[in-house]
Image: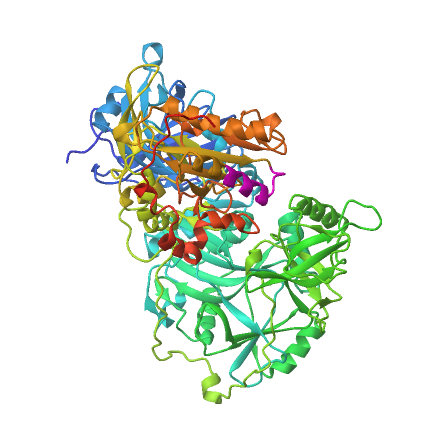
Amino acid sequence: MRRRQQSGSTKPAGARRRLADYRAKRDFSATPEPSGAGARSRSQSLREPLPFVIQKHAASRLHYDFRLGWDGVLKSWAVARGPSYFPGDRRLAVEVEDHPLAYGDFEGIIPKGQYGGGTVMLWDRGTWEPRGDAAEGFRKGNLKFALHGEKLHGNWALIRMHGRLENAAKPNWLLIKEHDGEERGADDKSITDEATDSVLSGRTMEAIASARDRVWNSNGGGSSQGSSAQPARRRSRAAKKDTPEGPPAPSPAKNLFGAGKEKLPGFIPPQLASMVKSAPRGEAWLHELKLDGYRIQARLNRTGRTASVQLLTRTGLNWTLRMTGIADAVAALPARTALFDGEVVVLAPDGTTSFAALQAAFQLGAKRPLSYFVFDLLHLDGRNLRGLPLIHRKEILFELFADVHNGSPFHLSQHTFGDGREVFARACNLGAEGIVSKLSQSKYSSGRTSAWVKLKCYREQELVIGGFTLPSNGIHGVGALLLGYYRDGKLVYAGRTGTGFTQETHRRMRERLDSLRQVKPPFATLPSDAARQAIWVRPELVAQVAFTAWTTDDLVRQAAFKGLREDKPAKEVRREVENRRMIEVKQTPRQAKVTAAPRRATPVVRSPRSSGTRTPESAGPLPIRLTHPDKVLDEQTGLTKDALAHYFVAVADAMLPHVAGRPLTLVRCLNGNGKSCFYQKHASASLPKEIGSIGVVDRKTGRPEPYITLSTSAGLAALAQLDVLELHPWGSKNNSLEKPDRIVFDLDPDAAIDWATLADAAKQVRRRLKSHSLDSFLKSTGGKGLHVVAPIEPEQQWPAVKEFAHNIVLAMEKETPSLYLTRMTKADRKGKIYLDYLRNERGATSVAPWSPRARAGAPVAIPLSWRELGAREAPRFLVADFSHWKRRLTTDPWKNMWSVRQRIPASDST
């Protein structure tokens, strides 16, 4: 294939020559920007992925640098206001000098006084795909292309302006979004306002600007220390010298005998320690200080020159953005892939750990330096270490930490051998929380095991908050918390605590609890005095509580509040029971020694899973290829694209009858459901091939428009690639668009409406439909509402079906106007249930059964049986918990919906 040419050139010029202007403007002894000294031209194949990056640059004024990789360099334009998804915005893009490809990894500070001095953020990155001959497009100034980035997608154009600007020293172009179904309206929120943070580090511009002693250096995997750029470049060159794809292999690699090969796994459920009454004895055990913090698994994945780090809680929640300093330290370690197990803490001046200070840092924004103490290594550079003896894993850890500098927040947890009783006594005298003792020859095994045991100097555990009382002194705070734990699915009352609060935690706790109030107590049973003056709340918050002992009636004695835990769901809280049968393990001195080359151990076989999530169904290959499968779409549960795709495949047989062959509206969340999402109903050329289109005539223009549709499980899986978290189908099929085959009633309650009242409303809709000889089906919306759906033969037009539904709800409103409302006015909805019948008009949609929702936790809109309305609370199901409720697929209440043959009666009076 012939060499592609740069814009405006008549023959290909070497990348070094084209970078001469770039290099002449910069002093590389003062700026950390890459010099591009090793850049060279290369023939461009359209089968190769072409990189693009957009850097947000606060220089003399804020602008966006748009860069397309071509022939060994980054062709570059300065876009003053940044890209826009609205095709009517023609954003001025001033062509500037070519930049080296290595510049695509740069994020940091260009020193004041240097060319372009200011803060640089890597705002977006991905690949671009020319539409037509790219070389011709560059030359003629009419370049059309598709972007496949983390923020920008779809078809775009760069058009060079003519007239007096055509031959300017810096040619002026226009960056324009094309009409392709991905565009947005003029009044929609701009992508630059919606997605403001770095795709490389997750930082804001302010965070990058304030880190003046740190420069992001992808070759070294993170932020490099030092006020000068020179040390960062020296590390970068050393890394390239040893391996062009990243940093040198860690020195411990030579000691990985017995560790089987594997891809870097996602989240590994942690190994947990059992509580015991006395410390173990014998040389088989090693002992560590028990730390009072958050259990965190650090996942490092270096691809080429880019280091990706995830910090995952013990339930797989992704907290990386809450601990960016620790993420930077992990990224700087000399490893390509690694999985660490440890604890994030705040150190007190006396060297102990303070959970209260940790809570102040996380919840109150207090400036407390976080430290990450690592005590285990589960994976390293393509090797599964979980089958190796613990003492050997620790030896590898020691070698890996040899070059970690003293100022790093990354620390190695020390251990000691000896009599556990003596170690425990010394730990308590030092003011530590206790000790954790581990069998030195044990493998890493997820879950609670007897190979790891813990002994506390004082008793402490998590308990669920089920209610509170008001303070007697009249302040706006909490008098006491009413606590419990789960046993056999029921919340068991465990006592109360009224101490341990500060003025700030009093106020914040009261605000949190007030938002969770409910009428009924959540506890299964209660002592008569416990309910006195109690205010009940939904049992969602978990408190860390210290206490002296359990009483004979199983209540905590002299309990003190230490803080809220955000890393453990309330439903998982159990009472910790001490193991009274601690077995001493005898071991010979020979066994106690560290073995340089242990005998080959059988690796623990695990399917690699997407990081940060309790994967719903990750076994088996997907029918489509995912890019960025580890991308987290829900921060609360850590749900990733990979896990979402497997979920869609798992529920395909149940979901497809309700979505296949219908126009669909999708809710896409490019930055996860914690950020702005948008609706898409029009098909475009950039959609995966598994997703089709159907022409729907626009009633205003009379012209058909391409609407999204699909018909296969591969099409459902492809939705995950598009970051789709909701599916909303029409109430009619593609072959009968004007005649719906279902009637939908959406019951949308005000927050003050309790579950029992909502359930009664659904029953009433059912009874009224039954009076017209119509059977109906029930579905939760994944939010606070319910849908009642009646299948019908597709015989009548939309207006007739809408009128029938309207008459049903009008009759309910007329009968009980204090409870029901049929108008959309939000101001009138207080204390009422809005009966939405407007789902039954052309173009309207309703969320599909089994669809996730773009809300915190990624709940599911799930079919319910009518008897489930008798539950004490609204059923709630999460995608991340699919393994716990997937049996519902075999008892799907909607399974036989399509065998029902029924019609709206000729007389539709209610």
x and y, in percent, of residue 49 in the image? 27, 40
Q: Is residue 31 visible?
A: no
Percent x, y for residue 766?
47, 39
Seen at 38% across and 23% down, the residue is: 800
Residue reaching furthest to the right: 473
Side of 680 relative to 342 (left or right): left
Determine whether 597 is above or below 303 in the image.
below
Q: How many marks?
A: 0
Q: Would you place residue 1 above or below residue 655 in this image?
A: above
Residue at 62%, 53% in the rendered image: 541
Nearer-the-camera pick, 649 or 90: 649
Instruction: State left or right for residue 411 relative to residue 771.
Output: right
Q: Residue at x 53, y 80 (%)?
A: 285
| In the foreground, 600 or 590 | 600
Q: Position of residue 321 (x, y in %)?
A: 52, 47
Horizontal side of 319 relative to 83 (left or right) equals right
Q: Nearer the viewer, residue 527 or 30?
A: 527
Residue 297 shows in this picture? yes
Quadrant where the N terminus lies?
top left
Q: How is the image coloured?
A: rainbow
Question: In this picture, which residue range is highlighted in magenta?
Answer: 751-764
What kind of secondary structure does the magenta stretch mostly adopt?
Answer: helix
The location of residue 871, given as percent across then percent down, is 54, 51
Residue at the top extreme, as displayed: 163
Is 192 contained in the magenta span? no
Looking at the rendering, which quadrant does residue 185 occupy?
A: top left
Q: Residue furthest left?
A: 1
Magenta run includes residue 756: yes
